[in-house]
Image: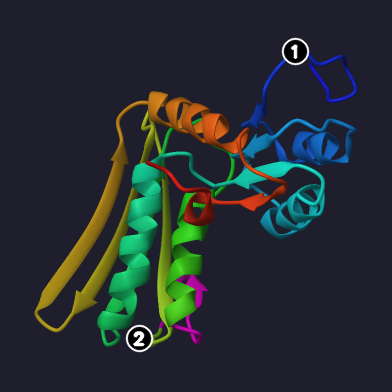
């Protein structure tokens, strides 16, 4: 297994889709290359480490390298305040080899909702209690099976009507292509911590 302590080949940037433990090693290493990080898990600690590293080089982070997912997040951020009396349920589906649940992308969507609904509380296991749904609940659902690349849906359920916003990844190519697009832009940027919100993507 390659580790950041090994000799790195000549490169313009490093793209990491690995594991939180390996990302921490990378962030602690002496590399000065621009970093594109799409690894999920241990989010709060990783973000803190990335922001520290960004003082000396450009560092980009996204839980999902699909620009379409970024737009999905922006749509959710826009819609949630407008649908204040609607219940919200989040569902994500992935292949049977994915080990973390909920996905980092779903957490990203939940964070966008939380910005507008400070009182929001995630609910994962309704089968463990017998009670009506509270107004502050945000239902969280994870499905694992087959070779599903990735599906995320935000359901707004109101009185006699529902609105669903969904993104479906049909190939893992979108994540690789998104990471390369970001890397090409990041190498022209000054030191700093970047996301899709401040990088500038054409």
- Check the image and report above or below for 122 versus 30: below
| Few, some or many residues within 10 Å of mark 2 (<14, 14–19, 20+) | few
Which percent across, then down, holds residue 25? 85, 36
Residue lying farthest to the left in this orientation: 160
Q: Residue at x 35, y 26 (%)?
A: 171
Task: Please check the rendered image and state whether residue 176 is part of the magenta-colored stretch, yes or no.
Answer: no
Which percent across, then down, holds residue 2? 79, 17
Q: CA distance from mark 2 to mark 1?
A: 58 Å
Label whose residue precedes the other's in the sequence (2 or 1): 1
Q: Is residue 186 left or right of residue 178?
A: right
Give the residue number, with chain letter if any, for mark 2. Answer: 132
Of 112 and 150, nearer the camera is 112
Q: Secondary structure at mark 1?
A: loop
Asked if residue 103 shows in the view, the reply is: no
Q: Is residue 6 left or right of residue 92?
A: right
Residue 10 tag number: 1
Of 36 and 96, nearer the camera is 36
Asked if residue 82 shows in the view, the reply is: yes
Which percent across, then down, holds residue 150? 38, 39
Q: Which residues are magenta?
A: 117-130
Which percent across, then down, holds residue 13? 67, 27
Q: Nearer the viewer, mark 2 or mark 1?
A: 1
Q: Secondary structure at mark 2?
A: loop
Q: Is residue 73 left or right of residue 111?
A: left
Could you tell me which quadrant the C terminus lies in? Answer: top left
Could you tell me which quadrant the N terminus lies in? Answer: top right
Tell me which corner region of the image, top left, top right, bottom left or bottom right, holds residue 37.
Answer: top right
């Amino acid at each position: 297994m390659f580790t950041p302590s090994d000799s790195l080949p000549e490169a313009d940037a490093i793209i990491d889709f690995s594991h939180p433990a390996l990302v921490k090693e990378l962030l602690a290493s002496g590399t000065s290359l621009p970093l594109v990080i799409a690894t999920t898990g241990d989010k709060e600690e990783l973000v803190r480490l990335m922001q520290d590293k960004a003082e000396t080089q450009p560092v980009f982070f996204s839980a999902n390298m699909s620009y379409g997912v970024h737009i999905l997040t922006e749509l959710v951020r826009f819609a949630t305040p407008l649908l204040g009396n609607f219940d919200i349920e989040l569902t994500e589906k992935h292949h049977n080899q994915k080990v973390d649940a909920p996905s980092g992308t779903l957490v990203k969507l939940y964070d966008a909702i939380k910005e507008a609904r400070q009182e929001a509380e995630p609910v994962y296991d309704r089968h463990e209690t017998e009670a009506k749904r509270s107004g502050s609940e945000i239902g969280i659902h994870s499905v694992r099976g087959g070779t599903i690349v990735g599906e995320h849906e935000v359901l707004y359920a109101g009185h006699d009507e529902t609105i669903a916003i969904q993104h479906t990844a049909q190939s893992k190519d979108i994540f690789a292509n998104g990471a390369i697009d970001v890397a090409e832009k990041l190498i022209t940027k000054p030191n700093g911590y970047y996301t899709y919100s401040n990088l500038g993507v054409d």
